Every structure is written in C-alpha cells, then in structure tokens.
Image (tube, rainbow, N blue to C red):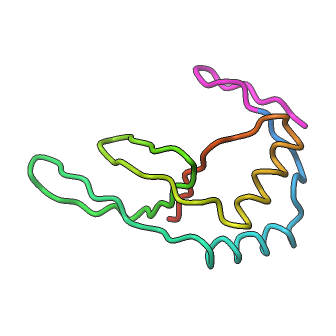
C-alpha cells in the first residue's frame, strides 16, 4: 500500500498487486461482456458531438454531470465482486460506479 500525494487532489492510496494479471484479464473480459456501454452526446455551440468515450453507470441512485443524466443500472456480477473486494480492502462501501471504455 502506497499513499500518493498530488497537489490539489485528495489523498490517493495505491494498492500494489490488488489483483494479479490473470484476475485482471478475467475481470476485464467479464466486464466487456456484462456492461452495456453507450456514447455520450454533447452540444457545443449548436453542434452535436458524439463522444468516443463510452460509459456505463451502475448504482441504486440517479446521477447527472455535464448535462448528462443517468438512471443507475443494476450491479453486474463482476462489478459486485469488485465492489466487495474494494470494500474489504479499504473499508469503504461505494454506492456507484461510472465505467468508461475508450
């Protein structure tokens, strides 16, 4: 465990080897199968732009940012597993995740 200090950002704790490379590949493959990613649409000066980044928001709560609103989707099995692993390691139970695919 390493604490990282970056000016103007909250404290960040980095857990080396939190998951190993084999687990990482399995989780990623599962997430790519389980998650339904969607592009975000932005309007700048009357021009509609579709973001290359795709997102999938999971929570029991709605979320809005940058004029994008999301109703939370249910936690997938892999997201729920990762959520529990993180809670066990950090003592923090997160209530939402915004997954990004670039």
- Give the residue at x 89% y 63%: 20
In the displayed structure, would residue 71 be above or below residue 65? below
Corner quadrant of residue 76: bottom right
Residue 89 percent across, percent down from the top left: 89, 42
Residue 53 percent across, percent down from the top left: 43, 62
User: Toward the viewer: 72 or 47?
Assistant: 72
- Give the residue at x 59% y 60%: 74
Tell how many labels: 0
User: Toward the viewer: 93 or 42?
Assistant: 93
- Residue 10 lies in the magenta-colored region: yes
- Give the residue at x 81% y 46%: 86
Residue 4 located left or right of residue 61: right
Quadrant, the N terminus: top right
In the displayed structure, would residue 31 be above or below residue 7? below
- Give the residue at x 85% y 69%: 23
Residue 79 percent across, percent down from the top left: 70, 60
Residue 69 percent across, percent down from the top left: 36, 48
Q: Which stretch appears magenta?
A: 1-12
Q: Main secondary structure of the magenta part?
A: loop
Corner quadrant of residue 35: bottom right
- Residue 41 lies in the magenta-colored region: no
**Residue farthest to the left, as pictured:** 46
In the displayed structure, would residue 20 be above or below residue 72? below
Corner quadrant of residue 80: bottom right
């Amino acid at each position: 465990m390493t604490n990282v200090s970056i000016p103007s950002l909250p404290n960040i704790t980095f857990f080396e080897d939190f998951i190993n490379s084999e687990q990482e590949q399995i989780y990623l493959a599962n997430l790519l199968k389980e998650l339904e990613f969607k592009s975000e649409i932005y309007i700048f000066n009357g021009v509609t732009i579709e973001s290359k980044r795709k997102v999938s928001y999971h929570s029991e709560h709605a979320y809005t940012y940058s004029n994008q609103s999301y109703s939370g989707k249910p936690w997938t099995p892999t997201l729920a597993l990762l959520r529990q692993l993180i809670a066990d390691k950090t003592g923090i139970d997160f209530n939402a995740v915004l997954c990004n695919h670039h």
